[in-house]
């Protein structure tokens, strides 16, 4: 770990500027895509996760929604209830990550647009 930290400290500033720029583009792809699908997207910073409210799609909780996403849509999200002392407090939220290549993010959004239906 110390070797990795030492290497990171020697990286030029341009590396971190480019890394930040790349993540901002990827975040924009995911956030705008999730909004267009119908999710309620919560602001995030300092992370490569985006938290959304999945309730517009009518599944009972975050675990059920994530299982549905995997089996029926081919997209993975992380249920947030696993991070709560009282899992009920996180049952309406799931998180997606944008530390993927841009094509993967676009494909995930496309799949969700095609296969997720908002409850009426």
Image (cartoon, rainbow, N blue to C red):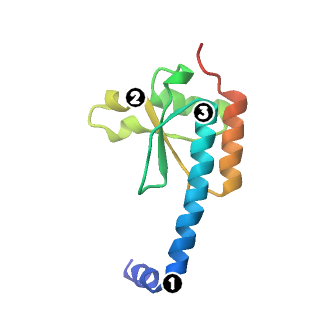
> At 59% across and 63% down in the image, what residue appears?
22
Which tag, 3 or 2, sits closer to the chain's start? 3
Mark 2: few, some, or many residues within 10 Å (few <14, many ≥20)? many
Residue for badge 2: 91
> At 40% across and 84% down in the image, what residue appears?
6
Residue 69 got which mark? 3
Residue 70 seen in render: no
The reply to whether the C-beta atoms of the residues labelled 3 and 1 are less than 8 Å apart is no
What residue occupies the far top of the structure in this picture?
120
Vertical placement of 20 versus 119: above or below? below
Which tag, 2 or 1, sits closer to the chain's start? 1
Marks 3 and 1 sit apart, C-alpha to C-alpha, by 40 Å
Residue 68 screen position, x and y as percent: 59, 29
In the foreground, 73 or 57: 57
Mark 3: few, some, or many residues within 10 Å (few <14, many ≥20)? some
Res. 18 image quadrant: bottom right
The N terminus: image quadrant:
bottom left
> At 49% across and 80% down in the image, what residue appears?
13
Residue 77 screen position, x and y as percent: 53, 40
Residue for badge 1: 12
Marks 2 and 1 sit apart, C-alpha to C-alpha, by 42 Å
Mark 3 falls on what kind of element?
helix
Residue 117 got which mark? none
Which tag, 3 or 1, sits closer to the chain's start? 1
Residue 35 screen position, x and y as percent: 58, 36
């Amino acid at each position: 770990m110390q070797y990795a930290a030492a290497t990171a400290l020697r990286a030029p500033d341009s590396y971190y500027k480019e890394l930040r720029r790349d993540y901002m583009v990827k975040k924009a792809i995911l956030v705008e895509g999730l909004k267009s699908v119908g999710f309620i997207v919560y602001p995030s910073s300092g992370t490569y996760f985006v938290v959304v409210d999945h309730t517009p799609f009518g599944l009972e909780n975050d675990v059920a929604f994530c299982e549905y996403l995997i089996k029926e849509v081919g997209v993975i999200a992380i249920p947030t209830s696993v991070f709560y002392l009282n899992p009920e407090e996180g049952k309406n939220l799931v998180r997606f990550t944008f530390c993927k290549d841009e094509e993967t993010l676009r494909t995930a959004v496309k799949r969700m647009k095609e296969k997720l239906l908002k409850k009426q």
